[in-house]
Image (cartoon, rainbow, N blue to C red):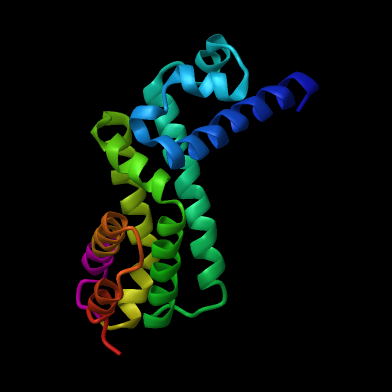
Amino acid sequence: MNLREDSAARTRAALVDSGLLLAERLGLGGVSVNVLVAELGVSKGTFFHHFGTRANYLLALHREFHERLQAVIDSATSGLAPGRDRLLAGSTAYLDACLRDRGVKALLLEARAEPLIVDEVTDRNTHNAALIEADFQVLGWPHPEAGARLWVGLVAEAALLELQAGHEQGSVRNALWQFLPA
């Protein structure tokens, strides 16, 4: 990578990082192109050069948030064999991370009306279900793929319930864990 490419990559990363921070403070409505470029001290042209549209920018935020989430989940499940303990560790890491970044999670929830985001959510949920299908195989589920897809939906719904409450909901998590045989 040459100096120019390196500078462009740093600028793009700064735009995404600033957007994630702004989302915490302002929500989706507050993360306008004007606010973002003013926060970073760059021109609108710089923003549009890197993203083209606000929808593409929201997609970049979505991807960055979920890549960070995946890193947290991978760390929490590293070394665990497929099964209940790995599902619980990964799901807990996901829920905790969503609570830590409530503003971003809220922003991404609001952004789901954007067609690019809808497709991304579908793809990501399919990918995540594939990652945990082995856990459901080990648990003896007769339809592990369906079980994995449903689990992804259950955990996402639990995250939304905690988002609405603004804090961890022990009853929600306990109910969630009860779907998995001991």
Q: Quick one: 27 or 151, which is closer to the camera? A: 27
User: Is the stretch drawn in magenta largely helix, strand or loop?
Assistant: helix
Q: For the point 38% across and 63% down, which residue is it?
A: 95
The image quadrant that residue 30 belongs to is: top left
Q: Looking at the rendering, which quadrant does residue 151 occupy?
A: bottom left
Which quadrant, please, contains the C terminus? bottom left
39 to 152, vertically: above or below: above
Splitting the image into 4 quarters, where does residue 39 fall? top right
Q: Position of residue 122 (x, y in %)?
A: 28, 45
Residue in view at x 55 percent, y 9 percent: 45
User: Is the residue 127 above or below the residue 92 in the image?
Assistant: above
The reply to whether the magenta stretch includes residue 149 is: yes
Q: Residue furthest top?
A: 45
Magenta residues? 141-152
Q: Is residue 181 above or below residue 156?
A: below
Q: Position of residue 87 (x, y in %)?
A: 38, 74
Q: 34 and 68: which one is in front?
A: 34
| x and y, in percent, of residue 34 in the image | 47, 16
Give how far across and how far down residue 139 sits, in percent: 30, 83
| For residue 179, above or below residue 122 | below
Q: Is residue 165 left or right of residue 102?
A: left
**155 drawn magenta:** no
Q: Which of 174/116 is in front?
A: 174
